[in-house]
Image (cartoon, rainbow, N blue to C red):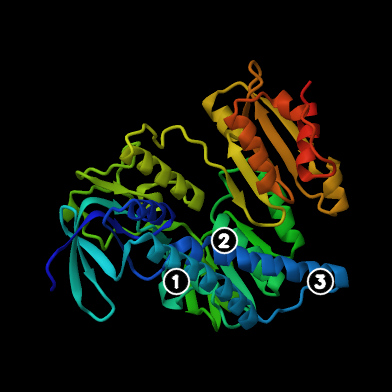
Amino acid sequence: MNKVQHYDYLFLGGGKGGKSLAMDLARAGKRVAVIERGMIGGSCINVACIPSKTLIQIARNHHARSLVDKEPVSKTDMAQVSASVKAVVDGMVDLNRRAFQDSGLHLVTGTGRFVGLRKILVQTADGSEQLFEGERVYINTGTFATIPDVPGLRELQPLTHVEALRLPELPSHLIVLGGGYIGLEMAQAFRRLGSDVTVINDGPRLVTREDEDVSVEILRAFQDDGINVNLDVRPVEAHGRSGDTVRIRLSDESMVEGTHVLVAAGRTPATHILDLHLAGVECDEHGFIKVDDRLATTAERTWAIGEVAGTPMFTHASFDDYRVLKAGIEGHSRSVRSRTIPYALFIDPELGRIGMNESQARARGLPHRVAKLPMAAVPRARTNRATRGFMKALVDPDSGQILGFTMLGSGAGEVTTAVQMAMLGGLPYTALRDAIIAHPLMSEGLNLLFATLK
């Protein structure tokens, strides 16, 4: 083993928040090292946001062509799809690799674990070991797909989203375990690429964090796409091998048969192999690292970033962790407390949300007014022949401040951003009601939505 290598800033994992901070510090002349198992640029670029959205767009294009041709869904060439996805990923990985090099940071490829306070032992691909020590250490190792403890499921060798994005052949019948974000995006994409798809969800409805009207509309959209959705059931036994023939018995004693199984049943923090106890870093009962509102762990001069710290599982949330940490380094006051994080679900119709929904407002006992508008009332939705869904906003009855916004419809994520800007500026809903918005844009619907509040 080589002697210990000292750095001002040492990062274990190179996700969005960590890599952004590491490059900033390296550009400022600090000695910085990033230890990464191999996904240059983090999971978003390699196995999550970028490849999945590329796959989804290809599926949308394929579906659109079938609608124009007025033909049933046809099977696409999955090898070609996977090659297209890989090309996008490779390009972004190369951009990140060059950005790392240009910043001056030291990229270490290998698997790291703690052997003491702010000391990390790294094993490289050739089996050699190197010891690193940082004046300040940041843990940014992310999460991985949870495989439920169902008899026979692991033996099936099921797909996660990682393997599904690299399939050489299109599944004939894909069984998706989970009705959350990853499961729904992948289910609809593969259906539109030509697979038969069955979704199994143990909850009484899909996307249970959303209001019931959102869940109902998404279910209708999936059923119209020909996706079979099983609600309020869970797998209890599995047989076969994913990629060949699989049979899954459900809690209602029914049996589902298919060719492939995709598990999208939650995420597990990547902390179990880090020996965090040797670093003085504590985790909660679920394995997420305990942090304060400035992302400091229980160990001195050691912080955690992103999903592994319990940050909401979005790349943009991890990037805000970077802002919090950078502010702390620069002596400014910024924390994760009370931040409002928007998000989007990339299905058709798209879901965008910022702030509270009706269920949350009722649970907190907050007085509110509700504005709701069907997408069919928005001129651009009609020109695009995309009238499924609705806009909905919650408004404080006294101040007129916007408490939250939900949109299920084409371009929902972009329209949600417009509402977010109004919320950040503290504008009342009347500002959007009376704003001059170009016609015909989807965001013009905000005029109509808030005009329903008298």
List the residue tagged with mark 2. 183
Q: Assign a secondary structure to mark 2.
A: helix
- Specify whether residue 39 is in view: yes
Separation of marks 2 and 3 at Cα, in angstroms: 23 Å
Residue depth check, mark 2 versus mark 3: number of the one nearer the observer:
3
Taking depth in this image into account, of 36 and 348 the one nearest to the observer is: 36
Tell me whether the residue at label 2 lies in contact with that at label 3, contact meaning CB atoms closer than 8 angstroms.
no
Taking depth in this image into account, of 311 and 194 the one nearest to the observer is: 311
Density class for disc 3 (Cα within 10 Å; few <14, some 14-19, many ≥20) is some
Density class for disc 2 (Cα within 10 Å; few <14, some 14-19, many ≥20) is many
Q: For the point 23% across and 43% down, which residue is it? A: 298
In what quadrant of the picture does the N terminus appear?
bottom left
Task: Tell me the amino acid under the disc marked 3.
Answer: Ser
Separation of marks 3 and 1 at Cα, in angstroms: 35 Å
**Vertical position of residue 230 compared to residue 368: above or below:** below
List the residue tagged with mark 3. 66
Res 321 quadrant in image: top left
Res 438 quadrant in image: top right
Q: For the point 36% across and 49% down, which residue is it? A: 305
Separation of marks 1 and 2 at Cα, in angstroms: 17 Å
Residue depth check, mark 1 versus mark 2: number of the one nearer the observer:
2
Task: Tell me the amino acid under the disc marked 2.
Answer: Gly
Image position, residue 12 (x, y; %): 30, 59
Taking depth in this image into account, of 431 and 212 the one nearest to the observer is: 431
Disc ID at residue 153: 1
In what quadrant of the picture does the C terminus appear?
top right
